[in-house]
């Protein structure tokens, strides 16, 4: 009886659940290939009266999407889609968002896709651009759930003359996406063994940059804001010192913005030391130098990576930043008081 129960548990584990122990061949999901369409729902924030001049500043939007995904390499997807939504405050104010977007996606296992997006179109009274990041997870053979976030800025002047530079609106959109082409032949590729966190890697991340003492953030004419949305990418190299210990270097490039029109860049160069206490987990400390809003900075912190399956891992990271010149910020307080907290997906090429 014990043997039968053990066999049943093993069959359930390998059939129903993904595990870092799964190796070898796996199949790219058909929901990330070919023609698709879906419904979208989420909040949109346009608070500067450049896209809409009446009604709620933050309101729900609802609409739809249609697009096409094309695999171009194992685990890599290029796509294009059209999104159209109506943002309403349920009274006398509503505006249209219609965007043509390109997507670059990376498979984080055979049922998940993480992607970058960018494009242009119409938002309310103005032409606008969008840039953001998102993720889709398959929940049935032909349906995926989506979550994405994007910053929005105006292209050219707006009719009321209230022109705002950089990013001045933001949306967080959920969706349900259906495959429409009947499930084309899936692309099979070799995932390889679970990563051991050595060699080259690259990834994308999303999170927030918070500067409560305003040691880095500037007021570009649209008010002081102590936190900004952050998204970007990273690349690095890990070297195995022993079976357990890792040392490496990494570069990060991020774009940070709020919805007031303030935006900036941060670029960091980090040294890392880490430990792999069990297979599929890397805990690490990091430190280095960089530029934040054009100011020289030092940085220290750390994070944890968990191997998903194949060569992908999920990362959470928290960094503390300070100015190299130790100049005080707007509040008169200096020191390492700025934080960058992100989550992301990392692809290892070991």
Image: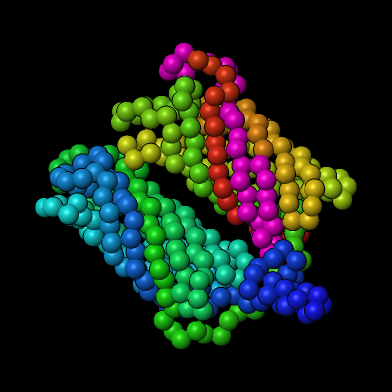
| Rendering coords of residue 112 (x, y %) | 56, 66
244 sits left or right of 146 in the view = right
Residue at x 59% of width, y 66% of height: 107
285 sits left or right of 118 in the view = right
What span is in magenta? 303-332
Colouring style: rainbow
52 sits left or right of 265 in the view = left
Residue at x 69% of width, y 36% of height: 286
User: Which part of the image, by quadrant, shows the N terminus?
Assistant: bottom right
> In the current view of this chain or complex, which residue is farthest to the left?
92
| Rendering coords of residue 219 (x, y %) | 36, 27
97 sits left or right of 325 in the view = left
User: Which part of the image, by quadrant, shows the C terminus?
Assistant: bottom right
Residue 306 lies in the magenta-colored region = yes
| Rendering coords of residue 289 (x, y %) | 64, 31
Residue 152 in sight in this render? no
> In the current view of this chain or complex, which residue is farthest to the right?
242
Q: Kindly indicate the quadrant of the structure image that contains residue 99.
A: bottom left
Residue 161 in sight in this render? yes
| Rendering coords of residue 87 (x, y %) | 24, 56
Above or below, comparing residue 184 to residue 40 in the picture = below
Residue at x 74% of width, y 56% of height: 280
Residue 330 lies in the magenta-colored region = yes
């Amino acid at each position: 009886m014990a043997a039968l129960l053990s066999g049943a548990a093993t069959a359930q584990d390998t059939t129903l659940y993904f595990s870092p122990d799964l190796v070898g061949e796996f199949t790219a999901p058909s929901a990330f290939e070919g023609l698709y369409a879906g419904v979208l729902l989420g909040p949109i924030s346009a608070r500067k009266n450049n896209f809409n001049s009446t009604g709620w500043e933050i309101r729900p939007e609802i609409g739809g999407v249609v697009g096409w995904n094309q695999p171009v390499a194992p685990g890599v997807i290029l796509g294009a889609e059209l999104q159209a939504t109506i943002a309403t405050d349920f009274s006398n104010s509503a505006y249209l968002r219609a965007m043509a977007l390109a997507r670059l996606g990376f498979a984080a296992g055979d049922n998940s896709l993480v992607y970058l997006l960018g494009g242009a179109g119409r938002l309310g009274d103005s032409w606008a651009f969008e840039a953001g990041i998102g993720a889709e997870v398959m929940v049935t053979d032909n349906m995926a759930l989506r979550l994405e976030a994007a910053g929005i800025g105006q292209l050219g002047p707006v009719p009321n003359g209230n022109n705002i530079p950089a990013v001045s609106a933001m949306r967080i959109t959920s969706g349900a996406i259906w495959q429409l082409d009947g499930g084309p032949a899936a692309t099979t590729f070799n995932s390889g063994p679970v990563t051991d966190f050595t060699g080259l890697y690259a990834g994308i991340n999303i999170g927030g940059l918070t500067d409560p003492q305003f040691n880095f953030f500037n007021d570009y004419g649209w008010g002081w804001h102590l936190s900004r949305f952050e998204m970007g990418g990273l690349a690095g190299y890990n070297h195995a010192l022993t079976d357990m210990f890792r040392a490496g270097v990494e570069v990060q490039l991020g774009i940070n913005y709020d919805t007031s029109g303030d935006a900036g860049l941060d670029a960091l160069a980090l040294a890392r030391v880490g430990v792999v206490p069990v297979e599929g987990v890397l805990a690490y400390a990091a430190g280095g130098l960089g530029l934040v809003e054009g100011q020289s900075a030092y940085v220290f912190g750390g994070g944890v990576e968990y191997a998903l399956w194949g060569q992908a891992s999920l990362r959470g990271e928290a960094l503390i930043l300070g100015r190299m010149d130790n100049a005080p910020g707007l509040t008169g307080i200096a020191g390492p008081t700025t934080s960058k907290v992100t989550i992301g997906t990392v692809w290892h090429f070991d």
